[in-house]
Image (tube, helix red, strand yellow):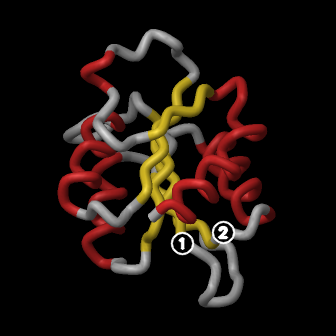
Amino acid sequence: MSTSGSAQRPVILVVEEEVAERVAIAEHLGEAGFDVVEAEDTDEALAVLERRSDVRGLVTDAHLPGRIDGSELARTVRDRRPGVRVVLISGHSDLRDDEMPEGVEFVSKPYLFDRLAPTLRRLMEAG
């Protein structure tokens, strides 16, 4: 699903395997002024990033199916596309330090809708 809007709206890729959560996050970000592209796993996310140069942000669950998990996806995107701002989300508070790539923000799912859009805005303004 893509949220329609003007070309001025930053494009955010949301990667979440649970459909209801992914749709809720996409709707929330769309209402907050972002255009959203969705992927259900890391393989699909990497394919989207290969064909779309306009993605400015990535919101990914830390624990996802695919050849790599969400933490490794975040690390890969930071390495390959340093201009893309990355937010790692999780319902687990037990993320190890080695799961948090440098330059990646973390938002816990219990606080997702309070903190996600402001975090993305701050990251976009900083870079």
The numbered dot on residue 34 is 2
At 39% from the left and 41% from the top, the residue drawn is: 104
Q: Mark 2 or mark 1: which comes first in sequence? A: 1
Q: Position of residue 29 (x, y in %)?
A: 70, 58
Residue 79 vs residue 29, the one in the foreground: 79
At 75% from the left and 54% from the top, the residue drawn is: 28
Label 2: state its secondary structure.
loop
Q: Quadrant of residue 107?
A: top right
Q: Position of residue 65 (x, y in %)?
A: 34, 35
Compared to residue 45, the image places residue 34 above or below, namely below
At 34% from the left and 79% from the top, the residue drawn is: 53
Residue 41 vs residue 34, the one in the foreground: 34
In the rendered image, the residue lying farthest to the bottom is 7
Crowdedness of circle 2 by 10 Å Cα count: few (<14), some, many (20+)?
A: many
The numbered dot on residue 32 is none
Q: Is residue 93 left or right of residue 31?
A: left
Compared to residue 87, the image places residue 2 above or below, namely below
Amino acid on which the number 2 mark rests in the picture: Phe
Q: Quadrant of residue 110?
A: top right
Q: How many marks?
A: 2
Compared to residue 117, the image places residue 112 above or below, namely above
Q: Which residue is disc 1 drawn over?
A: 11
At 57% from the left and 21% from the top, the residue drawn is: 91
Q: Position of residue 80 (x, y in %)?
A: 19, 60
Q: Quadrant of the C terminus?
A: bottom left
